């Protein structure tokens, strides 16, 4: 029988990205089957309970407490891992040279010239913190998910009233004045502004622009639901206005999955009045003048081409299995197959809530994908595997190295990133190619390559 251990740190807080990193590192310790660190909110405790990770001590945690929870195959190793968590937590704390505070008010006392707050708290508390930030005159990036749609709309109306930007909720990526926020990449400054309802979409386009010698003025994430009819593209329209006013932006790129029809028309009518060049990619919405892929959006904005590399390929029987970390990249690949009339292939977004509830996102812990890769490789009905490798700040230090631990058949991949990223894109690409992976320059080209393998 496995052993479940909990420790509660009273009055202890770490943001969700730090907690996901710690969960991954604890899970890698000997004898640990699963580990998770969460703030003790009712919703988080329900997730731990559902995962079989909540013990009596954790049940007593409050909303201001941190729960360290793990399941071990060995009691001694489990207790050792619980002690190791103390050391790992200390390594995640803010360096002593930086101010450490316990509230937004304290942060503003320490940094009185700050103009943006990044909010990464459990979803049930995110609205209150975002409202505090907006009322204090701060733009806000809400990394947190789980905010009800009606509350999202209310926050965005408040931001509009105060002439501020509300990025999110569930905003995973932004690039503001050259500063990468959350899961973003190291890309140069330039005159192309991006408004994106997709984190990995913004990453893919900004990195493709960088590889074509172009740069980004601002990349404004608006959250994946902003173009829903109930939100009405409030943040998207505000971001377009901001970029049109920005003297450093010459071109505006808009990225989203298909909006609600009425919202799509509203946004397109606004862009038609824009004084600057605009490029629109509504993935899945086929309409003349719109970019059909993220690659096409980047090329239209840059007025350049990403070179397609020749591959020596061998046709394969069986279906293509797509296993993705980025939801928009997964959707783009699936759409490319549908446009080719290729049916019967499967695409899984492993970053979806179904796979990440109580667990690290696969961009932080790519080992999560390896079990799926191994299963696909062992399935005689699968002819090839299609993958994304996403680099950047906050992502795993060596996602290619982790991926190559899983033995697989024919693998096609793309690498979203730049050589200035901590992981160094060219090194990750080289590592994959040395192992026989077919690496395409973009996600769209990887999907096209995988589609060409099928007969």
Image (cartoon, rainbow, N blue to C red):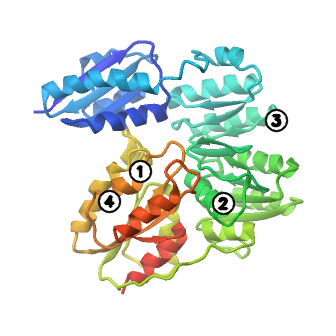
Identify residue for label 3: 163
Q: Which label's residue is closer to the chain start, 2 or 4?
A: 2
Q: Secondary structure at mark 4?
A: loop
Image coordinates of residue 245 in percent, x first then y, are 87, 48
Instruction: Name the residue nearer the viewer: 169 or 26.
Output: 26
On the rendered image, what quadrant is the N terminus found in?
top left
Q: CA distance from mark 2 to mark 4?
A: 27 Å
Q: Which mark is residue 222?
A: none
Q: Residue at x 71, y 45 (%)?
A: 178
Q: CA distance from mark 1 to mark 2?
A: 21 Å
Identify residue for label 4: 404
The quarter holding residue 223 reads top right
The quarter holding residue 9 reads top left
Identify residue for label 2: 210
Q: Nearer the observer, disc 3 or disc 4? A: 4
Q: Residue at x 46, y 64 (%)?
A: 429
Up-down relation of residue 241 to residue 8 (above or below): below
Instruction: Name the residue nearer the viewer: 185 or 45.
Output: 185
Q: Which label's residue is closer to the chain start, 1 or 4?
A: 1
The quarter holding residue 315 reads bottom left
Q: Residues within 10 Å of mark 2 (few under 14, many from 20)?
A: many
Q: Secondary structure at mark 3?
A: loop
Image coordinates of residue 165 in percent, x first then y, are 74, 38
Q: Residue at x 73, y 26 (%)?
A: 114
Q: Which mark is residue 398?
A: 1
Image coordinates of residue 97 in percent, x first then y, are 59, 19
Q: Is residue 350 visible?
A: no
Q: Which label's residue is closer to the chain start, 1 or 3?
A: 3
Q: Nearer the observer, disc 2 or disc 3? A: 2
Q: Is residue 416 left or right of residue 367?
A: right
């Amino acid at each position: 029988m496995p052993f479940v251990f909990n420790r509660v740190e009273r009055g202890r807080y770490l943001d969700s990205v730090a907690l996901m990193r710690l969960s991954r590192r604890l899970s890698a310790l000997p004898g640990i089957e699963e580990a998770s660190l969460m703030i003790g909110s009712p919703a988080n405790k329900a997730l731990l309970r559902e995962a079989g990770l909540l013990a009596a001590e954790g049940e007593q945690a409050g909303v201001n407490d941190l729960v360290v929870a793990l399941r071990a195959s060995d009691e001694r190793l489990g207790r050792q891992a619980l002690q190791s968590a103390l050391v790992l937590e200390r390594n995640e704390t803010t360096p002593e040279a930086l101010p450490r505070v316990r509230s937004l008010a304290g942060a503003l006392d320490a940094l009185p010239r700050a103009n943006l707050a990044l909010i990464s708290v459990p979803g049930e508390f995110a609205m209150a913190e975002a409202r505090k930030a907006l009322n204090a005159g701060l733009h806000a990036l809400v990394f947190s998910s789980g905010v009800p749609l009606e509350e999202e709309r209310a926050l965005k109306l408040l931001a509009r009233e105060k002439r501020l930007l509300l990025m999110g909720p569930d905003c995973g990526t932004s690039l503001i004045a050259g500063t990468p926020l959350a899961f973003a990449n190291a890309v140069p400054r330039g005159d192309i502004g991006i408004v994106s309802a997709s984190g990995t979409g913004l990453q893919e386009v900004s990195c493709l622009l960088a590889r074509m010698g172009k740069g980004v003025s601002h990349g404004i994430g608006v959250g994946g639901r902003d173009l829903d009819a109930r939100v009405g593209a409030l943040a998207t329209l505000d971001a377009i206005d901001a970029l049109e006013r920005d003297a450093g932006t010459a071109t505006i790129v808009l990225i989203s999955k298909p909006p609600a029809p009425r919202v799509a028309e509203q946004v397109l009518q606004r862009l038609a009045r824009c004084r600057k060049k605009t490029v629109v990619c509504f993935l899945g919405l086929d309409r003349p003048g719109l970019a059909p892929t993220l690659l096409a959006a980047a090329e239209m904005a840059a007025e350049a081409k990403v070179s397609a590399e020749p591959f020596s390929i061998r046709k394969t029987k069986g279906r293509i299995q797509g296993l993705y970390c980025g939801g928009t990249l997964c959707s783009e690949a699936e759409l490319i197959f549908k446009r080719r009339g290729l049916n019967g292939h499967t695409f899984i977004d492993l970053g979806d809530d179904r796979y990440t509830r109580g667990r690290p996102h696969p961009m932080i812990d790519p080992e999560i994908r390896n079990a799926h890769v191994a299963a696909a490789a062992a399935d005689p009905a699968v002819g090839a595997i299609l993958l994304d490798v996403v680099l950047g700040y906050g992502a795993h230090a060596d996602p290619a190295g982790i991926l190559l631990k899983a033995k697989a058949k024919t693998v096609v991949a793309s690498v979203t990133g730049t050589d200035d990223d901590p992981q160094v894109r060219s090194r990750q690409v080289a590592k994959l190619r040395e192992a026989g992976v077919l690496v395409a320059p973009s996600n769209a080209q990887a999907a096209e390559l995988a589609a060409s393998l099928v007969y």
